Image (cartoon, rainbow, N blue to C red):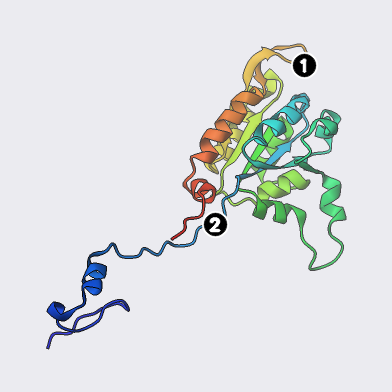
Amino acid sequence: MESVTSDANDFTGDKENKPESSKAAETATPSIVWEKRPVSRKPRIILAASGSVAAIKFGILADSLSDWAEVRAVATKPSLHFIDRKGLPASVKLYTDEDEWSSWSRIGDNVLHIELRKWADAMLIAPLSANTLAKVAGGLCDNLLTCIVRAWDFSKPMFVAPAMNTFMWTSPFTLRHLTALEDLGVIVISPISKRLACGDTGNGAMAEPATIDSAMRLSVLSDPIMQLLAAPPRTI
């Protein structure tokens, strides 16, 4: 006799002798068992600032991103000269270099730049100064921001919005450094031309917060992994 593989709902016997209820069940749509999905949540973004006067717009960016994402902010010591901490949304926690050292006292304690890297789905450095651009391109990691970058999982998106003087922007050093970032898959949101804080007029001003937010939103929310996280859990 030919063997037949059956599931737990099948039973053997003469089909003609099956009760009507069993015949009806046989033609019904089979049950579907869905795989479990993560609990629905917003994307998690690290918003970082380096030392550029464009950091005065940091609060605007944080507020914009917070409309659709969970945001954690990271600021270098020079950038704090321009950032208005009181202007940050209440939901956004700001981390500085001091937090990196004060949060660790012994082996086994969490390392802040590693914990932030694990937490995040994406990272944005805005503004990215010429100095921090050079550090990132060279793999240097002497503060919280650059340590996160050095430990970054580049399967996750990273965005940078450069801001610097026109002559710095057109420097051959900058071209080399940008090429290094692009080789890593970093997305560069190009600066714009305008009258700069130093008084010069030309390219090098950070892109407007609305432009940066739109670029981030389009890229992050269209990512298949983020679509999976954002989808509501399926029920049977």
Question: Label 1 vs label 2: CA separation?
Answer: 46 Å
Q: Quadrant of residue 209?
A: top right
Task: Please report whichever mark, 1 or 2, sits nearer to the chain's N-terminal start.
Answer: 2
Q: Depth check: give the residue in front, 60 or 155.
A: 60
Residue named by callout 2: 38
Residue type at mark 2 is Pro
Could you tell me which secondary element the residue under label 2 belongs to?
loop
Q: Residue at x 59, y 52 (%)?
A: 153
The crowding category of the residue bearing disc 1, from other C-alpha atoms within 10 Å (few below 14, some 14 to 19, many at least 20), is few
- Residue 216, position in %: x, y? 58, 34
The crowding category of the residue bearing disc 2, from other C-alpha atoms within 10 Å (few below 14, some 14 to 19, many at least 20), is few
The residue furthest front is 20
Front disc: 1 or 2: 2
- Residue 130, position in %: x, y? 71, 30
Q: Is residue 17 left or right of residue 161?
A: left
* Residue 201 showing in the rendered view: yes
Residue type at mark 1 is Ala
State whether residue 203 is above or below residue 229: above
Could you tell me which secondary element the residue under label 1 belongs to?
loop
Q: Quadrant of the N terminus?
A: bottom left
Q: Residue at x 56, y 43 (%)?
A: 157
* Residue 127 showing in the rendered view: no
Q: Quadrant of the C terminus?
A: bottom left
Q: Depth check: give the residue in front, 175 or 69.
A: 69
State whether residue 105 is above or below residue 85: below
Residue named by callout 1: 197
- Residue 225, position in %: x, y? 50, 49
Residue 149's mark? none
Q: Residue at x 81, y 30 (%)?
A: 87
- Residue 140, position in %: x, y? 71, 46
Q: Residue at x 71, y 56 (%)?
A: 115
